[in-house]
Every structure is written in C-alpha cells, then in structure tokens.
Amino acid sequence: ILMRSMQGEAKDVGQIMGSVGRELAARSGKNCIIAGGETTVTVRGNGKGGRSQELAVSAAGELAGLHNIALLSAGTDGTDGPTDAAGGMVSGETCMDIADQKTALSNNDCYTYLKRHNALFTTGPTGTNVGDLVIIVSDN
C-alpha cells in the first residue's frame, strides 16, 4: 500500500502514479502497488470524464512503451464524473500518441480518449463510496 490519502490535481497525481509504475516495471517478478484517496479536477475544457479517468489518461503517458504493466484508476461507487464508467485501466500500449493524450487532458475529455482506446473501466453502481482507488501491477 503506497498511500491512503491520495489527493491533488488528478493529472498531476496521474503523472506521479505513472512514474511509480515505471519504477515498478523495472523490478523483476510480480508486483502490485495500491493507493487510495480522492483527487480533484480543475475543469478548463468542455469534454466528458471524471477524476479517475483523468488520472488514468495522465498516467498512460508515463507508462507509454512499457511492457507487462497496467494501472487501474476507479471510483469505488462505480461512477466517475457524469459518465457511466468508474474510471480507466491503462497499460504501456494505451498511449502511443502523446499529442492525442495531451489534447484529451487539456479539454477534460478523458472519457472519449479512454473509450477510443478500449480502456474504460465500467462496473455500474456499487452502492458504496469509500473513495478512489489506484492499482498498479507489473509482471516481469
């Protein structure tokens, strides 16, 4: 468990979690890091998404090109922002076009980005709200 009080701007925390993922990908064996808390999003664009989706898209840029690594960012209530997704699940293959990723982040349109990359994480309502969860796994 990395932390239980994750907070800050979602895209900044996403970069940090992506960097943690890069470190994890360099280790041998099966590894898992868990973080919990709630981030925030300063809305500047007119796109669709939520804080967990924004964190995942931001992390995807840091994980780009890595193998055997995945990051899940999701709200435990099963919804993220005004969408039907709980968050996003990304890997080293998700973000191969950094310009596309940066456009999604600057327009707060991470839902569309994740949907296009088949990386939305959808559970439906869970009936509970403990916070947001980030899980990073690697297998080298």
Image (spheres, rainbow, N blue to C red):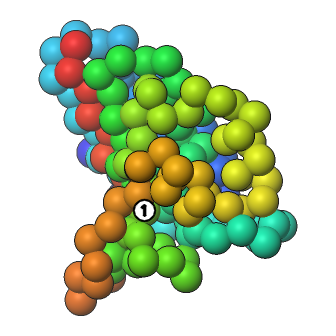
**Residue 101 quadrant:** top right
Residue visible at 45% across and 27% down?
93
In depth, the one of 140 and 109 nearer the eye is 109
Q: Determine if residue 5 is in view.
A: no
Q: Dot 1 corresponds to which residue? A: 87
**Residue 125 quadrant:** bottom left
Q: Residue furthest left?
A: 30
Expressed as whole percent of the image width and height from the top left, the position of residue 130 reads: 31, 77
**Quadrant the C terminus occupies:** top left
In depth, the one of 116 and 17 nearer the eye is 116
Q: Is residue 33 above or below residue 109?
A: above
Expressed as whole percent of the image width and height from the top left, the position of residue 94 reads: 48, 35
Q: Is residue 56 above or below residue 37?
A: above
Expressed as whole percent of the image width and height from the top left, the position of residue 13 reads: 58, 48
Q: Residue furthest bottom?
A: 127
Residue visible at 59% across and 68% down?
49
Give the left or right position of residue 65, taking residue 30 as reference.
right
Give the left or right position of residue 25, taking residue 15 as reference.
left
Expressed as whole percent of the image width and height from the top left, the position of residue 137 reads: 27, 34
Disc tally is 1
Kindly identify the amino acid type of the residue bearing the numbered disc 1: Gly
Q: Residue furthest front?
A: 116
Q: Secondary structure at mark 1?
A: strand
Residue visible at 70% across and 52% down?
104
Give the left or right position of residue 64, taking residue 1 as reference.
right
Residue visible at 67% across and 61% down?
109
In depth, the one of 137 and 109 nearer the eye is 109
Give the left or right position of residue 11, taking residue 20 as reference.
right
**Quadrant the N terminus occupies:** top left
Q: Residues within 10 Å of mark 1 (few under 14, many from 20)?
A: many
Q: Determine if residue 96 is in view.
A: yes
